[in-house]
Amino acid sequence: MTVNNFDYYNPTKILFGKDLYGRLPEEIKSHTQQTKVLVCYGGGSIKLNGVYDRLMASLKDFEIHEFSGIEANPEYTTLMKAVEIIRLHQIDFVLAVGGGSVIDGVKFIVAAAKYDGDPWEVLQRKPGCVFEEAIGFGAILTLPATGSEMNSGAVISRSETKEKRTMGGPMCFPKFSVLDPKVVASLPQKQIANGITDAFMHTLEQYLTYPTWNLLQERIAEGILQTLIETAPEVMKNPSDEKWAANLMWCATMALNGTLRAGVAYDWSTHMIAHELTALHGIDHARTLAIIGPNLFRIKLSNKREKLNQYGQRVWGLQDDCAEEAINKTIQFFHDLSIPTRLQDYVNNYEGTAEEIVKRFEQRGWENMGERQDLRLEEVEQIVKNSY
């Protein structure tokens, strides 16, 4: 047991705090000589919470183009319309204003705009198809959850084929991200709960594997989990309390900015399975993680027992051999957030879901997953069936 070899790279500049919109012009100008900016956002909530007005006031000296309607699971066909706008107007910088879905969508947009070919083939991992460059972009975070504001990964959906595909690369890091905790006050309870769950599961995927000798990463992960446990009831009760909102926002960013994975084993099989639940049934990403995660931990209990015991003792204050109790504590944490953890709580027609997911994994060659590369397809099928 040692510290695993690792490369660590994160070029994103974080502007954290209140009333930082006035710094946007200088940040944008440090990355482009042009004055054309494409502002991308979702359903228009930024026009209700004041973000849009503050943003536009700060960008009054730029030629602004707007693209709205990026979905909660950003759609390939929608995003390609933004790519056309960039090419038509020769735009050289993009601002993603929203949560992880908008930021993920913009990562695809800025890479696809520079790609000569069918961008979907890149997401399908076709040989020779890869994003090699991207237009520069920044992010204004309005929903703490996915950590997309400080990483290079994205998940893109295509509803006509019921697929969710991942992408990323060094060119897909935001140049800068603005994190203002005040926006949490305007979020619905469901979105706050989703954000907490998302950050919690991102941390567990990089922590609940097997012990390594990178003691710092172990403690950072445990610190994020403990902070989320402490923060969750307070921010749910009073999202306008900026001290709790700030802690949630920074936890969500730190959970997936590359720090936790440095020198340790990580899993991501929960995410791989959960993405298919969203693709097939349209369930919120965070909620699919809460459905799959505990059942995966149980199926791989023999592999994860040592780390589950550590998690139970250090994070939940349990004693001795507490792996099963630690899983139950995790489920109760989700339930306290009003996050159901069964597929039947979301959809009626779920029979055949497990078989369809296994079929998709077989087609992609995903036959050995998890931190030990020993999660078999028959186990994947059982995990999903146990989640019904």
Image: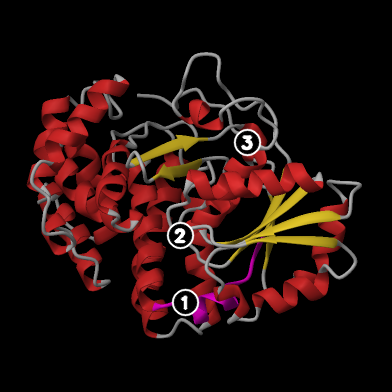
User: CB atoms at circles 1 and 3 under 8 Å apart?
Assistant: no
> Gap between marks 1 and 3, in whole Å?
31 Å
Nearest to the observer: residue 186 or residue 307: 186
Would you say 159 lies left or right of 291 here? right
Q: Is residue 298 visible?
A: no
Q: Secondary structure at mark 3?
A: helix
Tell me which label, 1 or 2, sits earlier in the chain. Answer: 2
User: Where is mark 2, residue-wise?
Assistant: 145
Q: Quadrant of residue 189?
A: bottom left
Residue 224: name its quadrant: bottom left
Decide: few, some or many residues near mark 2? Use Cα within 10 Å; few <14, some 14-19, many ≥20.
many
Q: Considering depth in this image, is 108 or 305 the residue closer to the camera? A: 108
Q: Please, what secondary structure does the residue beneath circle 1 have?
A: loop
Q: Residue at x 49, y 55 (%)?
A: 101
Q: Amino acid at mark 1?
A: Leu
Indicate which disc, 2 or 3, sits on the residue closer to the N terminus. Answer: 3
Q: Amino acid at mark 3?
A: Ala
Mark seen at residue 187: 1
Circle nearer the viewer, 1 or 3: 3
Q: Position of residue 232 (x, y in %)?
A: 36, 72
**Residue 263: where, in percent of width, then height?**
47, 31
Residue occupying the point 62% across, 43% down: 109
**Residue extent of the magenta highlight:** 178-188
Which residue type carries mark 2?
A: Ala
Marks 2 and 3, how far apart in space? 25 Å
Q: Which residue is mark 3?
A: 112
Identity of the residue furthest to the top in this view: 127
Residue at the spot 45% in from the left edge and 59% down from the top edge: 145
Numbered badge on residue 276 = none
Q: Is residue 122 above or below residue 137?
A: above
